[in-house]
Image (spheres, rainbow, N blue to C red):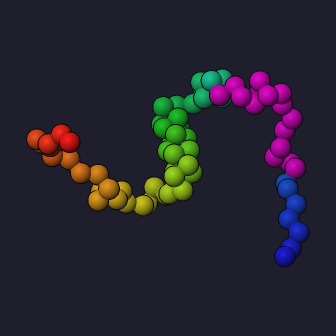
Amino acid sequence: MDDFKMDRSIVSKATFEEANDHVTFYKDKTTLERLNAACDIINHIFQSSPDDKVDRTIFSSRAYAKSL
């Protein structure tokens, strides 16, 4: 396998407090940019893509479901 090297030109040094300051980062973003970021995070967590269809066979609902 080839040796991979990290591109260090895009890395910056910061304290943990600065790196964890999400409020300041997203404060100047538009609502659409915030929603796109949230979608990207959700898609990454569930390992899906926006093109995937929702599996509707998992959930079911009834108007008057009997309680067990």
Q: Which residues are magenta?
A: 8-22
Q: Residue at 20% x, 42% y: name it.
A: 68
Q: Would you place residue 19 above or below residue 44 in this image?
A: above
Question: Is 55 displayed left or right of 3 in the figure?
Answer: left
Q: Is residue 54 magenta?
A: no
Q: Residue furthest bottom?
A: 1
Number of numbered discs: 0
Q: Residue at 87% x, 50% y: name it.
A: 8
Q: Quadrant of residue 16?
A: top right
Q: Nearer the viewer, residue 12 or 29?
A: 12
Q: Residue at 52% x, 35% y: name it.
A: 34
Q: Residue at 60% x, 29% y: name it.
A: 26
Q: Position of residue 33 (x, y in %)?
A: 53, 37
Question: Is 15 displayed left or right of 49 in the figure?
Answer: right
Q: Quadrant of the N terminus?
A: bottom right
Q: Position of residue 5 (x, y in %)?
A: 88, 60
Q: Nearer the viewer, residue 54 or 32?
A: 54
Q: Nearer the viewer, residue 56 or 25?
A: 56
Mark yes or no: residue 39 visible.
Answer: yes
Q: Position of residue 17 (x, y in %)?
A: 77, 24
